[in-house]
Structures are given as structure tokens and as C-alpha cells.
Amino acid sequence: MTLRRFVFKSQFDGLPKHSDFELVEEPIREPAPNEVVLEALYLSVDPYMRVFARNVPTGGTMFGTQVAKVTKSKHPGYKEGDLVVGHLGWASHSVVNPDQVKSFGGEVAKPYILPDLGGVSPSTGLGVLGMPGNTAWFGLTKLCQPKPGETLVVTGAAGAVGSLVGQIGKILGLKVIGFAGTDEKVQWLEDDLKFDRAFNYKTVSVTEALKEAAPEGVDCYFDNVGGEMSSDVMNQMNTYGRVAVCGSISAYNATTPVLAPIVQPTIITKQLTLTGFVSSRWKDCWFEGIQQMLHFIQEDKLVVRESIVEGFEKMPDAFISLFTGDNTGKVVVKA
Ligand SMILES: NC(=O)c1ccc[n+]([C@@H]2O[C@H](COP(=O)([O-])OP(=O)(O)OC[C@H]3O[C@@H](n4cnc5c(N)ncnc54)[C@H](OP(=O)(O)O)[C@@H]3O)[C@@H](O)[C@H]2O)c1
């Protein structure tokens, strides 16, 4: 038996390229005491990989999370057939001591056994029932502190996080306005996800769109993209508005600093609160977030969409698609 893994071969320069990765194949060794053999079922590609790769040395397995099946276990905490979520990288199989698995940041991050999802696909452990779901749930509720009747704007609205943020906003009784990059995505947001309004940021003025769709002003802004769009949204916010600064994908591939209109006068005069965050700050209540999102699914309150890419060898294509906007919902690679 052999495993395949993608080696992170060269630091990204602009848009990631296939040549930044190398696919290698090697035998799978037998597990030592306290080790397990894991077979990847679903692998995640996420925008953060583009950002944090600069802190990771080249030459090793590309980092990332996956849902994997335990195929052999010499560890008392795991048995054959268990499904786990862990930082196992872009590898088809892994032989690891779970107690020593580390995240890309270098902290020990023991793979966790996927909770009972009641028949929902295990792939969602990388999306709505995993990191992106918790990012949306905690980011919106804890940082935007929305109240029923308020107006929420979300950018990157048709993506893994954004599509959930908007739907949670509707569940919480907000008026929700989304921005996404194609007319098809806009139609999906309005027709299927029941956003109050959605706009293609590539073909409209964000300022004019908000003046028309939110004349009452914006109270909560879940910012997935940063840059000029964010400045435009903040300029339409109400006094004491709250901004959850989740991502700035508009600048991830930039090779020179990205300039955007200054927002400090708006932040000051409107007394806005901007909070940057990474989802791991809610690691102590991680499973509560998953259960909450699972309840929403079971109550038919959430439309969950995945862009499933078939084939482990397509990992780079799936990753690159995040930056070309080809995905709708969560991108997952099925090994
Ligand atoms: N803070 C955290 O803990 C945390 C956790 C998860 C994600 N994030 C961040 O949240 C954001 C969304 O992540 P995700 O996993 O949900 O990805 P995603 O939205 O599913 O995929 C990325 C999307 O970003 C949009 N995009 C790409 N380039 C863009 C550009 N130059 N300007 C505007 N939009 C662009 C594309 O959609 P369009 O067609 O609409 O352009 C693309 O589909 C990212 O910034 C990510 O880094 C942060």
C-alpha cells in the first residue's frame, strides 16, 4: 500500500500555481504503539492556507485539515472505523500519534472524533459542521452582536463562511444584504438562501447598492474580503455599528500593498467596533457551535452547499478555485 501527499514546494507568489506543489508517493508504514493509520475521506482547502503558508517552511507536506477514517489503531483513544477531523495535511493516508499532531501554527491539535451528525455527510465536518460553520456562528453572534430588525452586510456571501453568516442572520431576524462575484451567486443568495438583497460587487457600486438597499444604514458587517469593498460598507454604517473582521481575501494574492480608502474618520465619527478574530478563539466551545449548526440543519433552517472536487490529485485545482471565485459554498476534495 502506498500513500500520496502534496509537498509544499515553493512559497506562493501571487495566485498559487500547480508548480508550487509536488505530488509524491511512498509506502505506508506500520503504526508503532500509540499510532494510528488514517485514510483521508475528505480534505479541506481554505483561503487561510494562502496567508499562513508564508510562516511554513517549504519541503514538507502541505498543511490542512481533513476528515479521515481510522484504518488501524494502536492508540487507546481511537478504534478502527472512527472518523476524525484533524490537521493531517494534504495526504491520502497518515501514520501518526494523535497526541502529537500539530496545526500549521505549531500547537498540538489532537484530531477529534467527528460527533454523530445524524446522517449528515461527514464532509460537512470541514464546512458547516466544522471550522467555517463555527467561524460564521461565533463570529456573527459574539462579535457583531446582532439584534432582531438590524441590518447585516456580508461580503464573500456565497462562500463557505459567508453563505452561513447570511442564513444565520435571517434566522436571527436580521435584514441581510450580501455581496458576491457572479450573477449566479447573487441569484442563489436571493432565491435559495432568502437573503433580502444580494449584489454582484463586480458590476455594481457597493456604495450605491447599499444606499438603495439599506437606506436605514448598516448595523453589522461580517467582512470576508477587506479592501475597498470594506471601506465602502463601513461608510454606510450606523453609529455603534459592529464589524467582525474575518478575512481579507481581496489582498491574499497581492504582490504589492493593496490600497483602500481610509476608514478611520468613519470608525471615529460612527464609533464603530471592529474586531479581528480567528475561529480557534472559540475552541473551548467548539462542539457547542457544531451542535447549534446541526440543529439548524435538522430544523431545515439552513441550505448547505458544498463544491465537491473528486480526486485527491485535484487538491491544487480546488485550492486555486477559491481565488478565482469558481466555488459556491464550501470547497471539499473527496479523496
Ligand atoms: N478568521 C477566521 O477564523 C476565518 C475562518 C475561515 C475563513 N476566514 C476568511 O473568510 C473568508 C472566506 O473564507 P471561506 O472559507 O468562506 O472561502 P470562500 O468564501 O468559500 O471562497 C473564497 C471566495 O472569496 C471570493 N474572492 C476571491 N477573491 C476575491 C477578491 N479579490 N475580492 C473579493 N472576493 C474574492 C470568491 O467569491 P466571489 O465570487 O464572491 O468573488 C471566492 O469564492 C476568507 O477571507 C478567509 O480567509 C477566516
Image (spheres, helix red, strand yellow):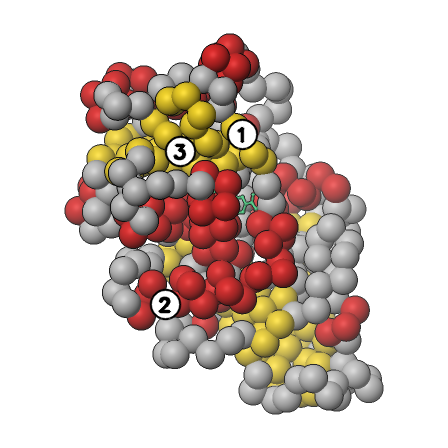
Residue at 56 percent across and 87 percent down: it is 81
Residue 120 picture quarter:
bottom left
In the picture, the disc for residue 220 is 3
Q: Nearer the viewer, residue 23 or 168?
A: 168
Q: Is residue 14 above or below residue 37?
A: above
Spatial distance from mark 1 to mark 3, Cα to Cα? Answer: 10 Å
Spatial distance from mark 2 to mark 3, Cα to Cα? Answer: 24 Å
Mark 2 residue's CB less than 8 Å from ligand 1:
no
Give the image location of residue 52, x and y in percent. Answer: 67, 43
Q: Look at label 1 and name its amino acid.
A: Leu
- Mark 3, secondary structure of its residue: strand
- Mark 2, secondary structure of its residue: helix
Q: Nearer the viewer, residue 63 or 300?
A: 300
On the question of residue 118 being in view, the answer is yes
Q: Is residue 120 above or below residue 244?
A: below
Give the image location of residue 122, x and y in percent. Answer: 45, 72
Residue at 37 percent across and 30 percent down: it is 219
In the picture, the disc for residue 63 is none
Say which residue label 1 marks: 274
Question: Which of pointers 2 and 1 lies earlier in the amino acid sequence?
Answer: 1
